[in-house]
């Protein structure tokens, strides 16, 4: 990780916690122009038995060398065993974020390291002078704003309770001017509302004695999420078709690569399903088809059956054959991707940086292997009404014409603080429109974070399907994860239409709540039919997995 830190001591004023003078806290304010601290001589401190309130009517900058207009009101209260912060800031410049600083956390907890709900069991991170910890919510590595340092006695649980999907960052570093790690919790405002005032969501910290209290704090966090975003238990979700509860295996049938190479035509896909269902009941199979629209990603955001694969006629036959076999069909669409050569309105919907001046990309794969990312692949925000309507119509015409059972929205787990359109709201409106038109349609996504689970009950996992979590309930209580598009095919490890090329294929028992996938590239069935049969039977629990 490349480290960006101040090269001087910012000399932030620090305050003791109510009822715990060992742990101290401070505040930093970030505008679109600079970093500000509290001016020490302009702070009024109000103490009560279980609370502390500060008022500061002038700010400082450059390590207390300069002064600025601005003010901060903040309070921390001890209630029900947890400390709760509320912070309000004002400044003449647009305020983008506020940082809560935490100093001198218990040494016993720090020695055990930091972890979050999707950290692997038994693993924790420790910061050093040249290797800080940086977790970002909602994407890519901090999937809910809850963290813990320590394991048992005097562990510290930290959570942010926000009813909106807004950026949060968790950062731990050990600067030379401190002899202990400094913990930072950064809350960022929706870029559409950057102005002279910002009030943070509630930031909570609990000192837990034992794993039971850690679990209790996390369960409290989950309860907040359920209320804030409408998360429902997997067993009772109304947006999960009944057939999805029977799925044991996802079959990735790859179509056409960006360069035009065809892995499987639609007739070849139908034959593959016939072969696969000799080893596993069709009712247990979800057939996922990337690259069905022709040249993968090149055709985005226009979707109809690719002519080189057989066109509409053969695609309709594929769907019919799948349904005869009991198999469900789920073609792939891009939630964000577009080819600027094809979609002329791309600039109106492209993700912008937080000040609205620069186009942001999710990634730019080198599809043609000239060793440079493609120039015309852009990523668009479904929060923009015209692009969202375009997606709705493209998906709807496919569902109506071919009666597919589900649709997959590529890269839906990404997130940007776009100042023009709120991405989460765009996803929500798109999914609600699809659900209104097609109540029994499965709408799946790629990647996930806590609030996104309320919209997409099924998602491909960016974390892999074999990794256990410290608290798997964050995912499995509400959702199911699928093996990823990039899973290598048995034998060669071909990732098909994906930009990964060849990955070693690993087929072993998935973690709870994760559904394995089987990738079918061009020669998979011809050369590795035995492995395919074993994987199908292993998914049913009738055979060992090949790699176990």
Image (cartoon, grey):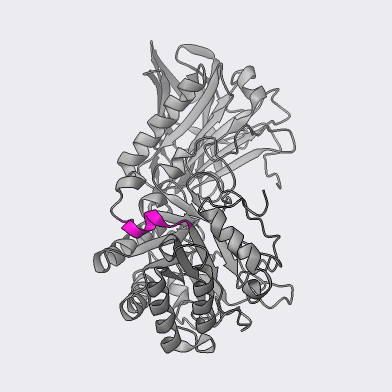
Which quadrant of the figure has residue 313? bottom left
Q: Residue at x 40, y 63 (%)?
A: 283
Tell me: 497 left or right of 332.
right
Residue displayed at 38% across by 57% down: 244
Taking depth in this image into account, of 302 and 406 the one nearest to the observer is: 406
Chain part drawn in magenta: 239-248
Q: Say if 156 sits above or below 69 in the image.
A: above
The front one of 435 and 78 is 435
Q: Residue 235 in the image: state x and y as whole percent.
A: 33, 46
Q: Can residue 230 be seen in the rendering of this structure? A: no
Looking at the image, residue 515 lies above or below residue 36: below
- Tell whether position 245 is magenta: yes
What residue is rendered at 67% in x and 38% in y?
132
- Nearest the viewer among 318 and 420 is 318
Image coords of residue 274 (percent x, y): 49, 74
Can the viewer see residue 213 in this picture? yes
């Amino acid at each position: 990780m490349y480290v960006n830190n101040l090269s001087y001591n910012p000399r932030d004023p620090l305050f003791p916690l109510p009822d715990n003078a060992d742990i101290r806290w401070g505040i930093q304010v970030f505008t679109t122009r600079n970093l500000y601290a509290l001016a020490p001589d302009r702070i009024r401190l109000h103490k009560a038995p279980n609370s502390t309130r500060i008022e500061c009517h002038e700010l400082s900058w450059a390590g207390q060398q300069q002064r600025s207009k601005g003010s901060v009101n903040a309070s921390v209260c001890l209630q029900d065993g947890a400390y709760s912060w509320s912070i309000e800031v004002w400044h003449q410049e647009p305020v983008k974020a506020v940082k809560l600083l935490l100093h001198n956390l218990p040494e016993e907890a720090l020695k055990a390291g930091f972890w979050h709900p999707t950290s692997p069991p038994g693993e924790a991170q420790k910061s050093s002078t040249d290797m800080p910890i940086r977790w970002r919510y909602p994407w890519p590595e901090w999937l809910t704003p809850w963290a813990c340092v320590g394991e048992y006695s005097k562990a510290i649980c930290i959570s942010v309770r926000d009813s909106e999907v807004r950026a949060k960052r968790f950062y731990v570093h050990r600067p030379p001017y401190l002899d202990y790690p400094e913990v930072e919790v950064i809350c960022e405002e929706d870029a559409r509302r950057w102005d002279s005032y910002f009030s943070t969501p509630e930031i909570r910290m609990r000192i837990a004695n034992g794993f039971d209290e850690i679990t209790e704090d996390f369960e409290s966090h989950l309860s907040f999420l359920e209320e804030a975003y409408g998360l429902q238990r997997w067993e009772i979700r109304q947006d999960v078709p009944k057939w999805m509860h029977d799925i044991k295996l996802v079959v990735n049938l790859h179509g056409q690569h960006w360069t035009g190479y065809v892995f499987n035509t639609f007739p070849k896909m139908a034959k593959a399903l016939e072969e696969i269902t000799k080893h596993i009941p069709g009712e247990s199979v979800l057939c996922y088809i990337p690259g069905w629209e022709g040249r993968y990603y090149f055709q985005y955001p226009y979707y109809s059956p690719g002519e080189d694969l057989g066109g509409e006629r053969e695609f309709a036959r594929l769907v019919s054959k799948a349904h005869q076999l009991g198999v469900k069909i789920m073609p792939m669409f891009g939630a964000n991707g577009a080819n600027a050569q094809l979609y002329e309105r791309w600039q109106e919907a492209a993700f912008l940086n937080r000040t609205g001046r620069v186009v942001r990309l999710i990634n730019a794969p080198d599809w043609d292997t000239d060793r440079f990312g493609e120039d015309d692949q852009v990523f668009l925000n479904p929060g923009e009404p015209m692009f969202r309507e375009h997606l709705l119509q493209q998906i709807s015409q496919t569902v109506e014409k071919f009666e597919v059972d589900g649709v997959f929205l590529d890269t839906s787990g990404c997130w940007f603080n776009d100042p023009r359109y709120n991405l989460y709201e765009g996803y929500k409106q798109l999914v609600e429109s699809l659900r209104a038109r097609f109540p029994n349609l499965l709408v799946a996504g790629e990647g996930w974070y806590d609030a996104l689970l309320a919209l997409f009950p099924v998602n491909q996992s960016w974390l892999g399907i074999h990794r256990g979590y410290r608290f798997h309930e964050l995912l499995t209580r509400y959702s199911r994860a699928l093996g990823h598009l990039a899973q290598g095919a048995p034998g060669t490890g071909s990732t098909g239409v994906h930009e990964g090329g060849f990955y070693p294929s690993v087929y072993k028992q998935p973690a709870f709540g994760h559904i394995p996938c089987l990738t079918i590239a061009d020669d998979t069935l011809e050369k590795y039919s035995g492995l395919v049969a074993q994987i199908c039977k292993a998914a049913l629990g009738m055979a060992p997995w090949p790699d176990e």
